[in-house]
Image (cartoon, rainbow, N blue to C red):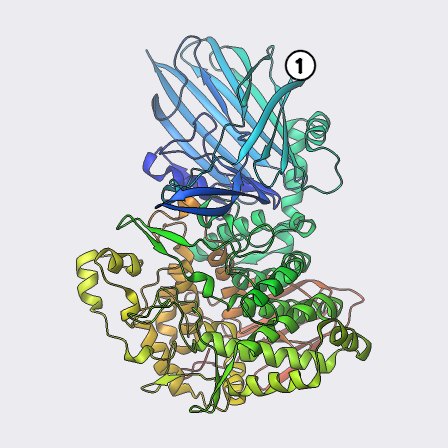
Amino acid sequence: MTGWTWGYEGYEPADERLRESLCTLGNGCFATRGALPECAADEVHYPGTYVAGCYNRLTSDVAGRQVENEDMVNMPNWLPLRFRVPDGPWLTPDTATVLEHRMDLHLGSGLLDRRTRYGLGAERVLMVRQQRLVHMGDPHLSALRTEFTTEGFSGELDVEAALDGGVTNDGVVRYRDLDGRHLTHVHTGTAVPDTVWLRCRTSTSDIRTGLAARLTAHAPVTTRHEKARVTQTVRLALTAGRTETVDKTVALHTSRDPAISDPLHAAIDRAGRAPGFDDLLESHLAAWAQLWRRADLDVPGEAGRILRLHLFHVLQTLSPHTAGLDVGVPARGLHGEAYRGHVFWDELFVLPYLDLHFPEVSRALLGYRHRRLERACTAAREAGRRGAMYPWQSGSDGREETQRLHLNPRSGRWLPDHSRLQHHVGSAIAYNVWQYCQASGDTEFLHTKGAEMLLQIARFWADSATFDDNLGRHRITGVVGPDEYHDAYPDAQRPGLDDNAYTNVTAAWVLTRALELLRTLPEPRRRELAERTGLDDGELDRWEDVSRTLHVPFHRGVISQFAGYGELAELDWDGYRDRYGDIRRLDRILEAEGDTVNRYQASKQADVLMLGYLFSPAELRGLFRRLGLRLDEETWRRTVDHYLRRTSHGSTLSGLVHGWVLARARRAEAWTFCQEALRGDIADVQGGTTGEGIHLGAMAGTLDLVQRGLTGLETRDGALWLDPVPLPEVSSYRFTLRYQGHWGVQVCLERGWLEIAVPSSDASPIDVRLPGRAVRLRPGETRRLALADRRRPSGAH
């Protein structure tokens, strides 16, 4: 690992799935895993190509039940390119002698560079070098350059390139009982002598896909059409020490693309017009250079190198090309098939970073949610509620995609899945609407689509709350919080928990923001909304009441995760660690023992502490004050300590949230959790999950940790607010922001100093607020500000 290169030395079959995920190349429209082109899908390798937003629905027979699932589809494989000495076996690292092998992912250029030396016996060596790109300038092109050099002999080499439509979704072992055959009507053909094509469609969503591949070499090309596959073969004459090159250029279109007629025609046309590899590489490098300028982040040391890798994968999944698509934030990127490519609440950890660099992408991702607002309102009505009830897992059309059953691989049992009760996803959407508009200054979106979403999410929470005469407060019952370990009370006949603290506090926040927005809307727009939605003053009075009276349970001086949490049994944490070592997936361990985590004060990930992730200390105290509750520093410290000792970190997001919170509450311990978040995917801390796709929320969250968490950066009330609490391990770094029309605002944090530089433009000055002072920076101005010593007792964050 160097500053701009992520490299792997040697061939290790056990590590291939992990490397393939982390070496994925993409451009925001599609991505291809970093599998070796000569290797087919098997237990070691899994070449996969995924197009943003392309889903298909299938029904499978599981445990005697018909189960319907929608999956992000593994598209036809454009990668295959294999080689052999004539009449010999095809060479792969699993079947031939590997003398040397290296993979280098060049982050600055979005280029995957592979070098392998195959031993052919009798001191004969074949050197293979490949450069691969998924074009960041043209989102429908990819290319593979392969260079062959012989050592110790001259002779012929057969090279076979292919487009393969016979692929299935088979990349996640625990899904293999489910039907994964999504592609149908596969046909192939030849466009011109050096270009072949493949077309197919998905079986139920009827998304048509067209691919065209052009093969360029100093030898005649022979084409063969097989079932669901088309191959192009060349026979190279190799002279010892002289390199022969084969270039494969591929165009990919689907019927979901804008501004095309037929995806196959578009693919053939694009492949025919595409320049050679060298010119493609030049324009690809230019596109990446622009991205890196807009997302400039310079953190020294190992942390900085990992952050750059994280940023690379965020940009590959959600690039400026994404702004033209109807897609959400896939929790596992476009890097694999885990979670079936579904959209959860991970945008809560992704959009705050994008807001300050690529606001047009944030707006598009919020547009995905707005287009599914009607479906969310339908779901709420079907549940007997008003407003919008967004699904926990979303896919193509916004219906609830959460599976009814999930497999515990430790016990082999299929179990009921109640995670659809995580209605707090609506609050995450509302939070992202508000944050985006504060950072971008996009009042048009706030007053139109943003207001519509906020209003309907607030309406859902107000209608979900019931008044308890004994408590004298409103309650929200039958939900599941961010901690997915608890989905029911012990021995209960029905799933769901009451008064989840995170759910109730964020619901109160949504209601408060919606009321604030309605008060500030232009009167004609407010009247439009009221007429379209039936909103009246009586309903707003209820919102006001609920926003001030939602119940937040406490026990023994700490905030309770949910009502009754303090009455659950304590777990023998040391005993379970002694017996199992890694207990991150404690739920699976206990279920396999015939027990349930519902009986214990044990959390998968931060739940209550998520409040300290979303809200600054002052805002969180204000929320509790509005609820008639006092949240002082001591109460928050006890709450942090309580859950810190009772969390197994079964999610990659958990270390991130704990690191963020502890950076302000207990700085000495914060870095341990920050490191866990940084290393979550590169070290595969969740035990094999990274090979199924990276964890996009955790990657983006680490970027936001240094952008907002350690700087205390907030965008509110028309100003940039900063309250830095740098950790000793990350105390000096710089990054670039895009804020309310200002491109390239540079923020530099050094020991004891904060420097802000605003580029020249005709935009308005930026108001910057620090503890105890305010400054105004005009375009073209740079200010260097001394920081007060912010070391202090624990506080709510």
Whether 326 is drawn above or below 60: the answer is below
Whether 694 is drawn above or below 91: the answer is below
Q: So how many labels did they put on this image?
A: 1
Residue that carries the numbered disc 1 in the rendered image: 193
Q: Quadrant of residue 477?
A: bottom left
Whether 69 is drawn above or below 347: the answer is above
Q: Position of residue 11 (x, y in %)?
A: 35, 32
For image coordinates 54% across by 86% down, the residue present is: 622
Q: Amino acid at mark 1?
A: Pro
Mark 1 secondary-structure assignment: loop
Task: Please state if 162 lies on the left or on the right of 717 as rendered.
Answer: left
Task: Please state if 414 lies on the left or on the right of 590 as rendered.
Answer: right
Q: Nearer the viewer, residue 397 or 737?
A: 397
Q: Position of residue 232 (x, y in %)?
A: 56, 17
Q: Position of residue 515 (x, y in %)?
A: 66, 81
For image coordinates 36% across by 34% down, the residue present is: 44
Quadrant assignment for the N terminus: top left
Whether 581 is drawn above or below 52: the answer is below
Q: Nearer the viewer, residue 475 or 780?
A: 475
Q: Quadrant of residue 348?
A: bottom right
Q: Nearer the viewer, residue 490 or 445?
A: 490
* Residue 766 visible, this orientation: yes
* Residue 723 visible, this orientation: no
Task: Please state if 554 lies on the left or on the right of 749 as rendered.
Answer: left
Q: Nearer the viewer, residue 587 or 760?
A: 587
Q: Position of residue 170 (x, y in %)?
A: 43, 37
